[in-house]
Amino acid sequence: MVDDETVWELSVRREGGLVRLDAVGDLDLDTAPKLLTEVVRQLDAGAKELVIDLTELTFVDSSGLGTLVGCWRRAQQAGATLVVANPNEDVSMTLEITGLDQILPIRDEKQAA
């Protein structure tokens, strides 16, 4: 669970060619480059499928949205797939308002379970 002190946390789990990145806190101007750096690192290490799990993401600003698109493009260039998973209601609304829900592959794993 995210508390008031948590600004950003990113955990990485690798299972073969699948990499799950769990983002916690705010994805903004300060933290977005950390996500991109980790995605590039995983792609360079041979990841074929990346899932960025936003279940615990509390806020995303324009730089965070741009970084999600940048991560998706980097994955495409590397011949990998990237999926944004489990955005909460606020993040989903932001993706819809900006039209990024029409560009980024988004999966709600909670409903699929």
Image: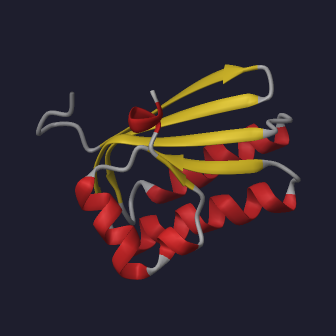
Q: Nearer the viewer, residue 112 or 41?
A: 112
Depicted 70 relative to depicted 98: above or below = above
User: Residue at the front extreme?
Assistant: 112
Q: Position of residue 111 (x, y in %)?
A: 39, 37
Q: Quadrant of residue 72?
A: bottom right
Residue sitting at the far bottom: 98
Going 22% across and 37% down the picture, which residue do you hit? 6
Question: Where is residue 38 shown, x and y percent of the image?
Answer: 63, 43
Camera-nearest residue between 110 and 68 = 110
Residue drawn 43% across the image and 64% down it: 64
Horizontal side of residue 78 vs 30, given as left or right? right
- Rendered residue at 29%/67% (across/down): 93
Q: Residue at x 67, y 31 (%)?
A: 19
Q: Residue furthest top?
A: 15
- Residue 69: % across, % down: 59, 68
Residue nearest the viewer, comparing 87 with 47 = 87
Occupied quadrant, residue 67: bottom right
Question: Which of 11 and 29 lies nearest the eye of the viewer?
Answer: 11
Residue 41 x/y as whole percent: 73, 41
Q: Quadrant of the C terminus?
A: top left
